[in-house]
């Protein structure tokens, strides 16, 4: 099976008061072409689908067109919310969408949603974790965590996993390596004082961690913990950076080959 990792579409974004909608239409058409040519089975959208919590009509229409095209290509779509998204708006129609193999996890409700993909050689289990803050988790689950790392550690401790299966996590968080955060750009907000950081070792049980939140493509600690980055450049600081789309090819249990388009 083949899986595409995307995040941070920021549909409807304006850069220096210039609308990016035409560029976004173009790049999503290119993505659809890759999905078709590469016979992609699953597309993971790891947060910040929209640039604003109240997206423009154009942005909503563009995302609708994109989902319709992926459905036409018989592609399963997994979506989580990011810090720019409104969980309530992104959740609209989500239960109905499941009949079209479009799964939306827009707000954490106490446990991570799971989607299982079955192959002749075994199962791939996707864990969908929308953007969460400790204050929300503490209130929802009646616990006391004092940092994003403590919060994530608690959530993962409550998640039952079959380690014999291929396990993939979708998350939209600020992951660090030895207290060093990812390389950011001017279009992002850095983690203030490291409060939002969580160490990549928290995710050692997962065979691949599909991250959103950071616009530069980069691995964190190991090859299979990765920010795919934004498809487009949203600040001058990104002018000389190359963009790519990670594609995972899985041919057997825990046998993941990573390539880039």
Image (tube, rainbow, N blue to C red):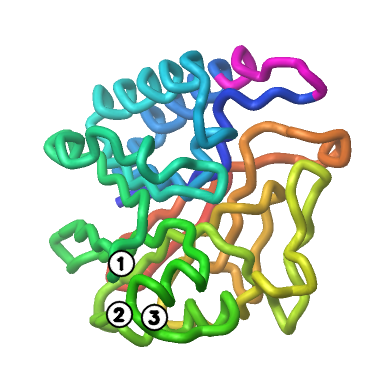
Q: Which mark is residue 156?
A: 3
Do the residues bearing badges 2 and 1 touch, measured as CB atoms within 8 Å?
A: yes
The percent position of residue 194, horizontal first and vertical second, equals 74, 74
Residues at marks 3 and 1, CA–CA distance in whole angstroms: 9 Å
Do the residues bearing badges 3 and 1 touch, measured as CB atoms within 8 Å?
A: no
The percent position of residue 7, horizontal first and vertical second, equals 53, 44
The percent position of residue 186, horizontal first and vertical second, equals 83, 44
Residues at marks 2 and 3, CA–CA distance in whole angstroms: 5 Å
Identify the residue at horizontal 37%, vertical 18% (top origin). Answer: 65
As drawn, 212 above or below 86: below
Q: Which mark is residue 112?
A: 1
Residue 231 lies in the magenta-colored region:
no
Name the element at disc 1: loop
Q: Which mark is residue 27?
A: none
Residue 23 lies in the magenta-colored region:
yes
Do the residues bearing badges 2 and 3 touch, measured as CB atoms within 8 Å?
A: yes
Identify the residue at horizontal 31%, vertical 41% (top origin). Answer: 91
Q: Which residues are magenta?
A: 16-24
Note whether residue 201 is visible. no
Q: Which residue is mark 2?
A: 159
């Amino acid at each position: 099976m083949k899986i595409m990792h995307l995040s941070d579409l920021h549909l409807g974004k304006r850069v220096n008061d210039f609308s990016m909608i035409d560029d976004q239409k173009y790049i999503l058409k290119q993505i659809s072409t890759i999905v078709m040519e590469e016979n992609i089975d699953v597309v993971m959208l790891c947060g910040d689908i929209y640039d604003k919590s109240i997206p423009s009509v154009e942005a909503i229409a563009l995302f609708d067109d994109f989902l319709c095209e992926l459905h036409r290509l018989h592609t399963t779509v997994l979506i989580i919310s990011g810090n720019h998204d409104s969980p309530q708006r992104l959740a609209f129609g989500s239960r109905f969408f499941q009949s079209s193999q479009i799964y939306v996890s827009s707000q954490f409700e106490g446990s991570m949603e799971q989607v299982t993909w079955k192959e002749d050689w075994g199962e791939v289990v996707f864990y969908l974790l929308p953007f969460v803050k400790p204050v929300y988790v503490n209130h929802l689950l009646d616990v006391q965590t004092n940092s994003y790392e403590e919060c994530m550690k608690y959530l993962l401790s409550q998640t039952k996993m079959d380690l014999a299966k291929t396990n993939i996590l979708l998350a939209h968080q600020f992951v660090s390596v030895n207290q060093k955060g990812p390389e950011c750009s001017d279009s992002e907000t850095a983690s203030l004082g490291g409060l939002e950081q969580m160490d990549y070792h928290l995710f050692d049980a997962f065979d691949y961690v599909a991250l959103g939140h950071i616009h530069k493509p980069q691995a964190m600690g190991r090859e299979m913990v990765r920010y795919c980055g934004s498809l487009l450049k949203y600040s001058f600081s990104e002018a000389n950076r190359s963009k790519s789309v990670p594609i995972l090819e899985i041919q057997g249990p825990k046998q993941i080959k990573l390539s880039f388009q």
